[in-house]
Each structure stands twice: as structure tokens, then as C-alpha cells.
Amino acid sequence: MLKLALNLALPAAGILLAALAQLALTTVWPRIKIVHSGYVSIDSYFVVLLALGLCFVAGRWAQRNAPTIAGAACAVVAPLAWLGLLLSSMVGVGPITWFRPIVLFVIFTAMTPLIGVALGWFLSAARQARLARAHS
């Protein structure tokens, strides 16, 4: 039960830590908000990459310590909630031009934790399968 709770909490903690890291970065270095790459500032890319990495680690840990369907389901609860939260925040603001770069960036930002957990889970499972074949 503890491992399932950790599978639930670790991706949520990764998302939260990435957001807090962005807040800390923009607090320490406020002028980073004026450095743009494309349509968003550099700190936005930083938070996406950090969330991807932290959720990847959470997915690997989840697969190693609770490699069951229940473990996988617990690991994707927070990323799916994040996806739903960000996508629902875009609805209701008027018509959405789905292929505008900023909208595509928000959609990718919303999907990043889910992608990280899934990659971590599947790469860990593949590694364990490869090790099992090598030992047999």
C-alpha cells in the first residue's frame, strides 16, 4: 500500500518541484522572463524539461517497486490530473486556434509529465526484461 501511495505521490511531487523551480528561477533572475525562444520565455522550457526528467525518474521508480497494473494506474493519476487541469484551463476563454504555437506549447506542457512517467515505466520494464533474459 505504501508503494502505491508513493507511485501516486512521486509524479505529483515532480510536477510541483518543477513548478517551484521555475518560480525560484524567476525570483532569483527576474530578467529571464524577457529572454524568449519562439513564443515563450526560456524559463518555460526549463520547467518542461525538469518536469519531464522528474516524472521519468518517478516512472522508473514506480515500475521497479510496484510493477503491477495498480502501480501503473497510481503513477499516472497526477500526470492525467495535470493534463486535465491545463487543458480545461484553455476551454472557456473563447475559440481556440489549436495550431497556434503557444497553444501547442501548452498542450505539450500538459502532456510532458505523462510522457515522462510512461517513458520511465516502459524503459525500466524493458531493462528488467533484458536483464532477466541475460540471466536465464
Image: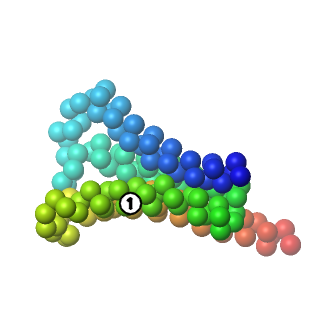
- Closer to us: 9 or 41: 9
| Relative image position of residue 117 (x, y in whole percent) | 53, 59
Residue 67, horizontal then vertical, whole percent = 69, 63
Instruction: Give left or right: position of 81 versus 133.
Output: left
Q: In which quarter of the image is the C terminus?
A: bottom right
* In-front residue for pair 58/73: 73
Residue 90, x across and y down, in percent: 23, 60
Q: Quadrant of residue 26?
A: top left
Q: Which of the 4 image quadrants contains residue 28?
A: top left
Q: Residue at x 19, y 70 (%)?
A: 99
Q: Which amino acid does label 1 sit on?
A: Leu
User: In the displayed image of the protein, which residue is found farthest to the right?
Assistant: 136
Task: Decide: is 26 above or below 54.
Answer: above
Q: In the rendered view, how is the structure colored?
A: rainbow
Query: Badge 1 is on which residue?
Result: 83
- Whether residue 68 is visible here, answered yes or no, is yes
Residue drawn at 58 percent across, 64 percent down: 73
Q: Residue at x 19, y 61 (%)?
A: 92
Residue 107 as seen in the image, left or right of residue 99:
right
- For the point 37% across and 61% down, the residue is 84
